[in-house]
Amino acid sequence: MWSQRMKHLRTYSLLLLMLFGMVACTMVEPRSADNASESQPASALEESVDQPQLAEGTDAPQPAEGTAVPKAAAAEDDTADKPIVPQATPAAKAPASDDSDTVKLGYHYRPPSDDTKASKLADKVSFIVLSKNDEDYRDRIRKAGYEGPILQYIMANEVDGPPDIQPGDWCDDDHNPWQNQVANKVGEFCDLIHPNEDWFLHNGKGERLYGMNEDRYFYRMNPASEGWREFAVERLKEYLHGNEKVEPLGYDGFFFDNVELSMRKSLNEVGNSDGKLKEYRSEREFRKAWQGWLRFMRNRLGSDTPLWANLITPNHTADDWNDYLPYLDGVMNEAFVTGYDWPLNSKAQTNELKQVEYALSQGKGVYAVSQGKEDDTSKQKFALASYLLVMQPDAPNYFRYTRASGKYDEWWSYDNYDVKLGQPLGPRYAIKNGWRRDFSNGYVTVDQKSRKGKIVQNDR
């Protein structure tokens, strides 16, 4: 009896195993969030939004096989380059929240001269640069709840001195300098800087090189001069840590303005430029001197002191920043994709996108400032959409649309700063005349030829 029961039991078990095997063959493997992002086309997002119009005969973008990065559609030759994908923040991941702010805003250089209250700025921005003597406004911002970094603005290698002082000239000890540079004490230029000729840059005639700001003379200093470097870093340390005579100013770090990637400004664009620099014969020598200056500041101020810089250059290449990045925590592009007085072509725009992507991939911050008129909302949207093509949610990347004329002391607010696109589903990819990027709650497109941007948030 027992053996007969066991025989029936084995037969029954075998039938059950065969039945389960047949069922398993017909089941579809459930997709994880990662699998879904790899196999679901980006166009699935578009069912609830307006789609950007593609040229007749152009296929809508589809995802490349086996990857979350969409395949490039037909595009102009100068925009078809593959973007650099930052490795620090994976491009495709499950969104933490579609309700979080997509746009992180910055503000610089002076407190607003309009009616913008400290509480409003504290609520809107995530990155601030102010100058010495702005401490009262800075403290009001912090009291209003702002928790981000506030850096002290410093003109890196420029000094405010009496008008057109050349070697051997009488020097006015009563000159009262601006506070946005390191020689900021009355009489200091005459006593400590004027006697040291090797601290200065000189034009081809041997004159001290200077630029003008309003009625002020700003002398351009030699970034390779050891004496000048020592003077500058000691003043920065005084600002940062204080000494037996003065208290620390209380800023979180420094923002260096006018860090030059090219000789062009010194050669041709300041007050007494004559096309030559006595100290430098090549761009390579000049850049090496600036890199040495940054390395010196980094070593002496320490790795825990945030150092950002406005890197100025006439070039629009994808790697112009690279030699300077190791010594900095973040960089500014002061005319991101817009240029100042004339627009950038598609290739220059794309190179600037690549440069931002590379900096973010190296763990650096980026402050993208775009130039235009306050009421030019089309240009503002184009600039913001370009920023959204490359921003990373967990990285210190910030945006501002403003105008270089004046002191950057107005706060311009736009409704699209409150857009909530969720997490990026991948990097930008090519479409006709430009780029597109998909998010978990919308998408952005940029037409680089017409300089138009589109920012679409899904209805929920």
Image: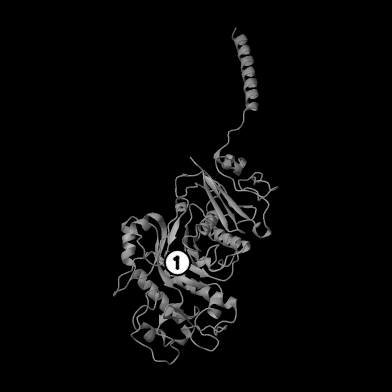
192 or 331, which is in the foreground? 331
Left or right position of 391 against 217:
right
Q: In which quarter of the image is the N terminus?
A: top right
Query: Does any portion of residue 352 appear in the rendered image?
Result: yes
The residue most toward the front is: 375
Residue 125 in the image: above or below residue 250: above
Question: Coloring scheme of the render?
Answer: one colour
Residue under circle 1?
Answer: 307
Question: Where is residue 293 drawn, in percent x and y?
Answer: 49, 74
| SS category of the residue bearing label 1 | strand
Amino acid of disc 1: Leu
Question: Where is residue 45 drawn, in percent x and y?
Answer: 57, 42
Which residue does the image show at 38% across and 69% down from the upper left?
131
Q: In which quarter of the image is residue 390?
A: bottom right
Which residue does the image show at 55% across and 54% down from the upper left?
453
Q: In which quarter of the image is residue 241?
A: bottom left
Question: Where is residue 55 drawn, in percent x and y?
Answer: 67, 50
411 or 260, which is in the foreground? 411
